[in-house]
Amino acid sequence: MQSTPELHPPIVALAALAANIASNHPNQGLCQIDRLKGYGVARAHIDTVIEIARHIRDEAASMLDQRLDAALASPKAPATLFAKITVVEPQTTCCTPTASGKSCC
């Protein structure tokens, strides 16, 4: 059985940084930034990962807000704690580009 090669530590740190930011984790990946600097990862690469992660986080929050607003505006909205929220059809693209035009897909 062939084993899967380990990911390089800088790749793991970039993925962890993105996940921390996109999930709105309280630590925001600050220790990963120190690790990435120690690995010699270019500042531009770190900046790109941060931009994409923030964009995904903000896009997710906006979509949740839109669903909540739609449910509140609906005349049929039940007054229960676990009200059924209207499902919004996904956009045709997997995501929108960041403000500087970088793709997050």
Image (cartoon, rainbow, N blue to C red):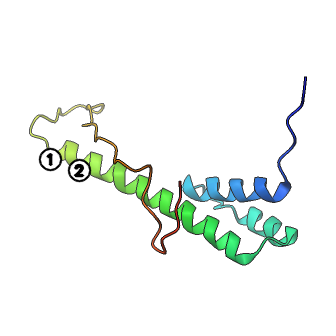
Label drawn at residue 86? none
Q: Amino acid at mark 1?
A: Ala
Tell me which corner region of the image, top left, top right, bottom left or bottom right, holds residue 51.
bottom right
Question: Cβ–Cβ below 8 Å for labels 1 and 2?
Answer: yes
Circle 2 packing at 10 Å, graded few (<14), some (14-19), many (20+), is few
Element type at mark 1:
helix
- In this rendering, position of residue 105 left or right of residue 77: right
Q: Check the picture and name the quadrant holding the N terminus.
A: top right
Which residue lies at the image location 81% right of the left edge and 60% below the top edge? 10
Foreground of the two, 25 or 50? 50
Disc 1: which residue: 73
Query: Is the residue 43 above or below the residue 56 in the image?
Result: below
Q: Quadrant of residue 61?
A: bottom left
Mark-to-mark CA distance, 1 and 2: 6 Å
Which residue is identified by label 2?
69
Q: Which residue appears at 42% of the width and 59% of the height?
A: 96
Dot 1, crowdedness within 10 Å: few (<14), some or many (≥20)? few
Q: Position of residue 99 (x, y in %)?
A: 45, 72
Q: Where does the image place residue 74, in percent across and percent down from the top left?
A: 13, 41
Q: Quadrant of residue 52?
A: bottom right
State the residue at coordinates (26%, 31%).
84
Q: Is residue 90 above or below residue 22?
A: above
- Is disc 2 placed on a helix, strand or loop? helix
**Height in image: 86 above or below 22?**
above
Q: Nearer the viewer, residue 98 or 25?
A: 98
Q: Is residue 47 left or right of residue 69?
A: right
